[in-house]
Amino acid sequence: MEYKSYASFDPNFLWGAGTSSFQVEGAVQEDGKGLSVIDVMQKNPDITDFSVASDHYNRVEEDVALMAELGLKVYRFSIAWTRIFPDGNGEVNEKGVAFYDHLINELIKHNIEPLVTIYHFDYPQSLVEQYGGWLSRKSIEDYRSYAEFLFKTYGDRVKYWLTINEQDHVVRIPTRLGLTGDDHYEQLRLGYQANHNMCVATALTIKTFQELGIEGKIGPAISYSMVHPASSSPDDVLASKDAMLIKHNYLMDLHCYGKYSLMFWRYLEERNFTPSIEDGDLDLMKQYPPTMIGVNYYFSEAIRAFPSTEEYPIGYQKKALLPEAEAGVFEVVNNENLAATDWGWEIDPVGLRLTLRELHERYNLPIIITENGMGAYDKLEEGDIVRDDYRISYLREHIKQVQLAINDGVRVFGYCPWSFLDIVSGRNGMSKRYGLVYVNREDFDLKDMRRIKKESFKWYQKVIASNGEDL
Ligand code: BGP
């Protein structure tokens, strides 16, 4: 819908940017840090690992000074669980505690709100070895008490807390659960048990947060990419609704309503994926829902129907990192209407407006965009220039849609592009850059890791200074 006039961004809108500990810090075994599942997972020999990353661990002041120069109101970062508890539980690592204390104080000194992700994929390997990690209910108390430690240590200065980053991308990616082997269906079954345990852990952590009387907001950072029916054929429309449930809404229904919808439970039952649930688990989730939602949005997907056949019976899934095709449910196809990034992610700013409206209509919670950005092969030119106009246009079009969603009545209170500076991509090494700041290193050449402001940095600086008026 178009309106005759448009409200501007709220004067307190939180313009930010984000990173995650394993992708930015480096120093993976410095100062007593323990190993995470990311540190021990099988490496792809063609790309860098996360051992040095952007060396943020040794460059906090320099990076925070750049954030201040950019004018950030909020900085999203994650805390490495194993920097605080090297074994995931038990003994505290004081040097790790001091590192985040210093980072938070530096941010506060520059009037930048810390937005802390409690856990962003780098789960303690020791907990996997101790009891199977998230597959065991023991994981619930270890996560809750780790979070409680953070609340007690940093809660006087941190008002915004994200519980788990992209839980859906943990339960469906075996290495992030510390699983090995390649029985896809068995790993999915285990994934849904882990998912249930994570939802109980999240509810108990929100309960602890409230009992401690921490002033602020808390909720998950979810991966939520809008799905569109590939055509107006009613079968495709139905398939897109089913995909929205199986890919995204199943998780938020649990967090917000403590509910496995009848449809989703039948989906799990027919595939022997049903998790074991204890009395009180669902009531706990209902009683302690999130008070905000973090949204990670990069692209949308087009969906068509995939009728089951003898060759592809109900339950058949095309093996892929994330659900792409499932017989009897849906299939992801290219969207001819959209351009795509160098990695095939279909660029859909309007999809972000639709995503925000869907979340608002279903859960009616305050929303902050915790990730949105474009991975690209950025080129460093003579004179330290990086002309990333493609990134500027990507971010501009998405910010416009955020403003429209706010005009639609969605309570969006902040926007954090991914990523503040170049970091190691989750699966594509150093060549897939997202930052507003260029980091001068390559996959296998650390160079000097100098920080260089891209054109997008200068552009975003103006956006923030004008509170979104000057795009
Ligand atoms: C999200 C993760 C981020 C980041 C991002 C970009 O799923 O939360 O950690 O990795 O995706 O993806 P990639 O780095 O694979 O391009």
Image: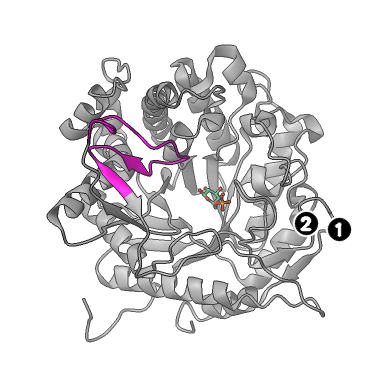
- Which residue is under mark 2? 442
- Which residue is under mark 1? 447
Q: Which residues are magenta?
A: 309-331
Q: Quadrant of the N terminus?
A: bottom left
Kindly tell me whether residue 175 is visible in this rendering. yes
| Residue found at the far top of this picture | 131
Separation of residues labelled 1 and 2 (CA atoms): 7 Å
x, y percent for residue 241: 21, 49
What is the crowding at mark 2: few (fewer than 14 residues within 10 Å), some, or many (at least 20)? some
**Is 321 included in the stretch rendered in magenta?**
yes
SS for tag 1?
loop
x, y percent for residue 47: 71, 47
Front-lying residue, 15 or 173: 173
Q: Between disc 1 and disc 2, whose residue precedes? A: 2
Amino acid under label 2?
Answer: Glu
**Is 323 included in the stretch rendered in magenta?**
yes
